[in-house]
Every structure is written in structure tokens, then in C-alpha cells.
Amino acid sequence: MAYLVRRLLISLPVLLCVAVFSFLLVHYAPGSPFTSEKNISDETLIALKKEYGLDRSLPMQLALYLRNLSKGYLGRSVYYKDQTVNEIIATALPVSAKLGLFALMVALLIGIPIGILSAYRKNSWLDHASMAVSMIGISLPGFVLASLLILFFSFYLGWLPAVGYAGPRYVILPALTLSAPYIAYLARLTRASLLEVLSQEYITTARAKGVSTARLLFRHALKNGILPVISFLGPASAGILTGSIVVEKIFAVPGLGINFIHSALHRDYFLAIGCALVYGALLISFNLLADLLAAAADPRIAHDRAG
């Protein structure tokens, strides 16, 4: 409990730093939210800056933003007229979360069993084939894989829609694109972790007593071998969500990632900062959740970190 409270207290200054640095970066970036406006007069530009509070000095703008942030208000979007950042995120985040959760489940359901089978059949053709495919999955860029999946499943076979978001069928190709590298990472990590555990003395002793390899693997080695995989789930979950920025753009999924891209392209200050804060909060939360799961699987971890 003390470890959890300490981590939560640490996360608040981290998020504050994310907010401050994001604020400064977007304000010092070239251009302004109104550079795309055509034939804008000086009077209109002054009025727009005043409306969004951009006519004040930078320290005053930062102080005002942090005051609003303490109340849970993320500001108004410049690109999406008459919408607040809170409203945009409330609409887009569930879409990204659904896509990310589906991709994570696919990665877990495929990657971990492949790693277990590779460890069980070490140095077999199955082991070599799965590790070769895993290496391809790690090396292949997401936008290339997305293009290949669209060409094969949408244009050639006609089974799945290429772009859009209008039902469960539209989630399959983006989720496969997102999950592919993490399937590979999980497979390799699970295999390496299990092989390391299988080389330890208590496993050698059990094998000398006549315990079968399958029993050693599933009854004894898997509990300890799965700990690195659990620790990896924190950054993996956050990576899947942040990786959806490109995937959502390719597949035209109306999630948080595509809004992040639009905010950067159109210098939508408050939306860009809001998206950065959400991604930062998700990264912290998932890492904390992974640490808690690892501590639950091995109480020694909780004791060491509490100390």
C-alpha cells in the first residue's frame, strides 16, 4: 500500500512536467493556430488571440492554463470550432482504448503461447520458424504492414474494410497492425525467460527426479518465467496506444491519435497539450499496473520495492 501511495504521489509532478514542457514546446514551435486562416485581418487576429487567451505574456498564459488544469479543464480547441478539449478527448479516447485493448489481447493470446511452444520445442523447426517470423514482425514498420494487410484482406480477398470505423469488422486490420510487433516481442521474451528458468538448479533437480519437460514448463517454470512478461505489459500497453497515432491515420479511425496529428499540423495548442497529458497519464498508469501485477505474482517484489 505504501508503494502504491508513493508511486501515485510521484506521478503528479511527472504529469505537471509533461504539461509545462508540452505547453512550452507547442508555443515555441514555428507558426500559430491562425496561420491557416486566409485573408485574416489584423483586427480579427487580435480578437482571436484575445478570445483564446493568447494575447497575454507566455508566463501569464502558462499560469492560466495550469489554473484551469487544476480544475480539470483542458481548454478550447482552435481547430475544432466550438468544442472543448475535454469533449474531444471524451469522444476519441474510448475509440483508441477499444482498439488498443483488442490489439493487446491479440498480442497476449498469440505471443505468449508461441513463446511457450518455442521454449518447449527448443531448437526444433517450430522454434526456428517462430523466432524467424518474430524477427520479421519486429523489423517490419507499421505503415508497411498496414499497407500489406489492406492490399491482401481488403482489395484482394475483399473480406475486411480498408478504412473507417463503423463496426467490429473495422477494428480487425488496425488491431492486427498494432499487435504484430508486440506479438513478436512477447514471443521472444517468453521463450528467453522460460529457457532461463529451465536452466536453474531446482528445475534440474526436478528433472533428475523424473518430472517431464511439459510438467516442468507448465507447473514450475511458467510462474517465474512469466514475471518479465508482466513487467513488459506496462510499456507495451502504453506503446500500443501511442503507436495507434500512425495506425489511426492510415485506417481513418477517429481516435485520440488522429486528433493528436491534427493538433500538431494545425498548431492547436490546447488539444496537443491535452493529448500529451492523456498519453503521459496512460503511460504512468500502465507501468504502475504492471508493477502491481508483478508484485502480486511474486510477493518478494512488493517487499523489495516497499523498502
Image: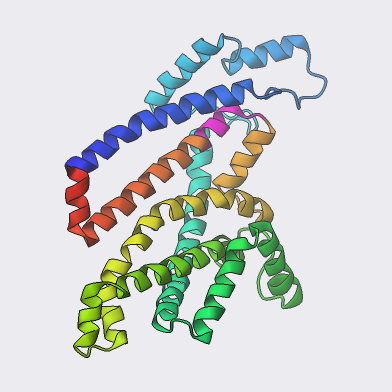
Q: Mostly what secondary structure, the magenta segment?
A: helix
Position of residue 233 relative to residue 189, above or below, is: above
Is the image coloured rainbow, by chain, by secondary structure, or in one colour?
A: rainbow
Which corner quadrant holds the C terminus? top left
| Residue 8 figure quarter | top left
- Residue drawn at x 53%, y 46% is 92
Locate the N terminus by quadrant: top left
Observer-nearest of 214 and 98: 214
> Where's residue 226, x and y in %?
33, 66
Provide residue 142's location: percent of width, then percent of height.
64, 58
Q: Is residue 104 visible?
A: yes
Q: Hey, which quadrant is residue 143 in on the image? A: bottom right
Q: Is residue 242 magenta?
A: no
Q: Position of residue 289 (x, y in %)?
A: 32, 51
Residue placed furthest toward the right: 39
Magenta segment boundaries in residue numbering? 267-275
Query: In front: 254, or 281?
Result: 281
Left or right of residue 258: residue 70:
left
Depicted 16 relative to depicted 6: above or below: above
**Residue visible at 56% across and 80% down?**
129
Left or right of 256 in this view: 282: left
Q: Is residue 228 above or below residue 60?
A: below
Residue 167 makes an appearance in the image: no
